Image (cartoon, helix red, strand yellow):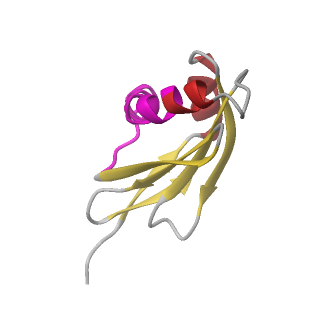
Amino acid sequence: MSMEQTYYINPEKLIKVVNRMDNLKFAGLEVSDGSHIVIDIELEGIDPEAKVAGYTFVKRKQFIAAEVLEKAKIRFSRTSADIVEANLLRLTIYPPKNIVFGIE
């Protein structure tokens, strides 16, 4: 039997980290069964019709993901960053082996 450790995420800290970043706004956090967490981040002030802004957002998504993870000090083994709407970035973060995510 493997001993699983729980790594707790502090939502307030996460919200502060995201909201302090340029043009970004925290839009949601979901911790399912602990196997991953989903963080939604909104890009503020862009016209959804503006292709250039959308393109810039797509190009910046990995950078945004890295910065959020680093500043919030979230331990992870891998993460995916997907643009789910013109101005919404969804980060799906998977914990390291033998670790589950929880909410503080």
Q: Give coordinates of residue 52: x percent, y percent.
A: 56, 25
Q: Give coordinates of residue 49: x percent, y percent.
A: 71, 33
Q: Is residue 55 magenta?
A: no
* Res 35 visible: yes
**Is 27 or 46 nearer to us in this picture?**
46
Above or below for 1 versus 70: below
Above or below for 44 versus 81: above
User: Which residue is situated farthest in the bottom direction here?
Assistant: 1
Q: Give coordinates of residue 61: x percent, y percent.
A: 45, 35
Q: Is residue 12 left or right of residue 78?
A: right
- Which residue occupies 59% across, 25% down? 53
- Which residue occupies 48% across, 36% down? 58
Per the picture, the main secondary structure of the magenta-coloured stretch is helix
Above or below for 34 versus 54: below
* Res 68 visible: no
- Which residue occupies 33% across, 49% down? 76
**Is 55 or 91 nearer to us in this picture?**
55
**Is 59 or 28 nearer to us in this picture?**
59
**Image quadrant where one finds the N terminus:** bottom left
Above or below for 63 versus 38: above
Q: Is residue 64 magenta?
A: yes
Write the start and end of the magenta stretch as one range: 56-76
Q: Give coordinates of residue 3: x percent, y percent.
A: 29, 72
Count of numbered tags: 0
